[in-house]
Amino acid sequence: MLAERLAGKSRGEAEGEISAFLHMMRTEPDENLGELAALKGVVQTPNRVRCATLAWDAFGRGLAARGQ
């Protein structure tokens, strides 16, 4: 889902998408994220939240590290 969502996006757009997704997983569903909003349901099982956000967090950290 991450690869499909970020394909063709600029670095800034990708950072925005990652931030919005991670924010949604900590707060309320965001219908602007389309099919990603379905992943909000994993918050009912806290161990699965880390699985759902792992790739997004890693990609965001990679972008941040590369920008330094």
Image (tube, helix red, strand yellow):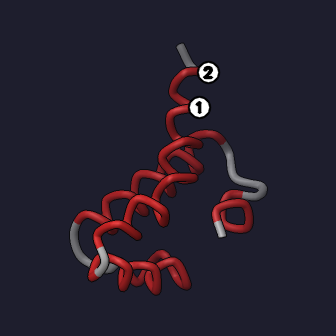
Contact between marks 1 and 2 (CB within 8 A): the answer is yes
Cα distance in 3D space between marks 1 and 2: 6 Å
Which residue sits at x=54%, y=21%?
65
The image shows residue 51 at horizontal and vertical percentages of: 48, 62
35 over 25 or under it: above or below: below
In the displayed structure, does residue 12 sit left or right of residue 30? right
Badge 1 local density, few (<14 within 10 Å), some, or many (20+)? Answer: few
Q: Which mark is residue 62?
A: 1
Q: Which mark is residue 1?
A: none
Is 42 in front, or is 29? Answer: 42
Badge 2 local density, few (<14 within 10 Å), some, or many (20+)? Answer: few
Which residue sits at x=64%, y=62%?
2
In the displayed structure, does residue 65 sit left or right of residue 42? right
User: What is the residue that sits farthest to the right in this orientation?
Assistant: 8
Q: Which mark is residue 66?
A: 2
Amino acid residing under circle 1: Gly
Which residue sits at x=57%, y=50%?
13
User: What is the residue that sits farthest to the top in this orientation?
Assistant: 68
In the displayed structure, does residue 62 sit left or right of residue 9? left
Amino acid residing under circle 2: Arg
The image shows residue 64 at horizontal and vertical percentages of: 51, 27
Numbered marks: total? 2
User: What is the residue that sits farthest to the left in this orientation?
Assistant: 27
Which residue sits at x=51%, y=77%?
36
